[in-house]
Amino acid sequence: MGTETEYGIIAPGVADANATVLSTQVVNAYAATLREGLGNLTGTRWDYTDEAPLSDARGWQMGRLAADPSQLTDEAPVLSAEQIALVDQGLSDPSEDATVLMNLVLGNGARLYVDHAHPEYSSPEVTSPLDAVRWDRAGDVVVQRAMQRIASTPGFSPVNLYKNNTDSKSVSYGSHENYLVPRAVPFNRIAAALIPFFVSRQVICGAGRVGIGALNQQPGFQLSQRADFFENEVGLETTVRRPIINTRDEPHAVAEKYRRLHVIIGDANLSEVSNYLKLGTTSLVLSLIEQELVPVPEVADPVRELQAVSHDPSLRHLIRLTDGRQVTAVDLQAIYFEAASKAVATQGSTDPQTADILQRWGTLLDVLRGDPMDGARQVDWIAKLKVLQAYRDRDALDWKDPRLALVDLQYADLRPGKGIYYRLAARGAMERLITDDDVVRAVSEPPRDTRAYFRGHCISRFPKEVVGASWDSIIFELPSQRRLQRIQTREPLRGTAELTEELFAGSRTAEEFVSRLQGGPEPSMAP
């Protein structure tokens, strides 16, 4: 599994700043920071060869002419000459190539890039929810370092980044999750089981938002940053006509074996517990689907109920099911929780992380059935609401008061001295699962148990010879070879530390490394 985070971005000192240019500054600022320790990284480009954003899991291909331009993620973004001139000031060492970077492959196996008008961090592949939280947090540190670099660069105005999902002026940007599931599981079964789960999941992992409606048409507070921006139940789009279930069929792995479930409905979480439960409970439900043990409580009007649940912080809204029952979102979550608990108990699983997620999930649902505010140490929307309510009580503020919208934004501010989440966490008001030292290590070190280890170490060990990379390949340019050498990494659970650590340690040069990989018993290690 893995996460993708698009960060909100502004430059307070620059009127009418171009968000794409600001995003490019973030990527190039981080590249400049890395160059200080790793040498020239400008030679590694993102390899779009295997991207297929218009392939639909329902069995067809959308035509390029019918696609929204934002869907064409298999094309590198392009800046105008004027924009390049604006970016390329002061962030690069003058001795380095002046190329403006739109993509950067990191030594921890992640990708930092410009996605339309936002800097985006895609975490490396991991095998557990806790590791997903760890490398997701590493992305926050990556962009924090970029912010610091820009702020200290003469001639540049400081850039502020926010881990949120809307500017509350009609624009929403994503926080995506990716799960690898067997291709043999029918997509329709996945969609049917996940729609009610996602309609209700926001009670445990919503980020909270001041304002109701995509344009903040009504005053108030809701659970989710994203709910008001969804219009369909199932579809291929991610930026227009957003669906609860995204059908993009782009596995970034052995296509015959796997499909990648691309989840676009989640909020960006700062709370580690919310993030952990978001990823962990979804993994458990996918496991139930795979084993054909999942309940399917069919919701009569999923999009309307998604928004109704979000608009009701009391959690008393009743969702109408097609069988005539009416249940709360907590009730719906309990249906999945009970099925997962029964399956784990029946199978006698001893995985401690699975047990921990189930214990936390059940406990939190009990809390939400009582007084939801008791979940403020674990859940973003509750922590944010508690802070907002304190301001409202102290100053008699109406939900229309713009100061509350500022508090909402400040909760997601990634500057540790400014962001309300960080201040809450610093005084123990938010539960932590990962230490700061672990997060810092994850900034530079890849996971050891996936192909991200191979990708990250290729980038770190041979930055000048690795000229291209993607999720499922690494491209070397070697002096002795007339052609580029592409190493396929389509199997996500190969290329691990166990399989390749000795190969890295025993290779003094990229030439030697690739030669041993292609000529010895090691070829089976990476692909």
Image (spheres, rainbow, N blue to C red):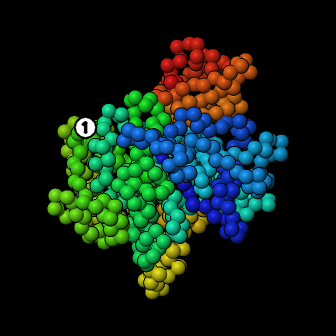
**Residue that protrudes farthest toward the right in the picture:** 95
**Residue that protrudes farthest toward the left in the picture:** 324
Secondary-structure class at tag 1: loop
- Which residue, given by chain and number where applicable, does mark 1 sit on? 291
Please name whichever residue, 492 or 374, is drawn nearer the observer in this view of the structure: 492
Relative to 356, say whether 465 is above or below.
above
Please name whichever residue, 54 or 311, is drawn nearer the observer in this view of the structure: 54
Q: Position of residue 436 (x, y in %)?
A: 53, 51
Residue 128 shown left or right of residue 438 in the figure: left
Q: Quadrant of the N terminus?
A: top left
Residue 236 shown left or right of residue 188 in the figure: right
Which amino acid lies under the numbered mark 1 shown in the image of this protein?
Gln
Relative to 232, say whether 295 is above or below.
above
Q: Position of residue 383 (x, y in %)?
A: 42, 67
Q: Position of residue 80 (x, y in %)?
A: 73, 52
Residue in the image at 59% along x and 30% along y:
474
Residue in the image at 30% along x and 59% along y:
302
Residue 284 occupies quadrant: top left
Residue in the image at 76% along x and 60% along y:
156
Res 390 seen here = no
**Residue that protrudes farthest toward the top in the picture:** 520
Relative to 340, say whether 421 is above or below.
below
Residue 286 occupies quadrant: top left
Residue in the image at 64% along x and 60% along y:
19
Q: Position of residue 15 (x, y in %)?
A: 70, 70
**Residue that protrudes farthest toward the bottom in the picture:** 396
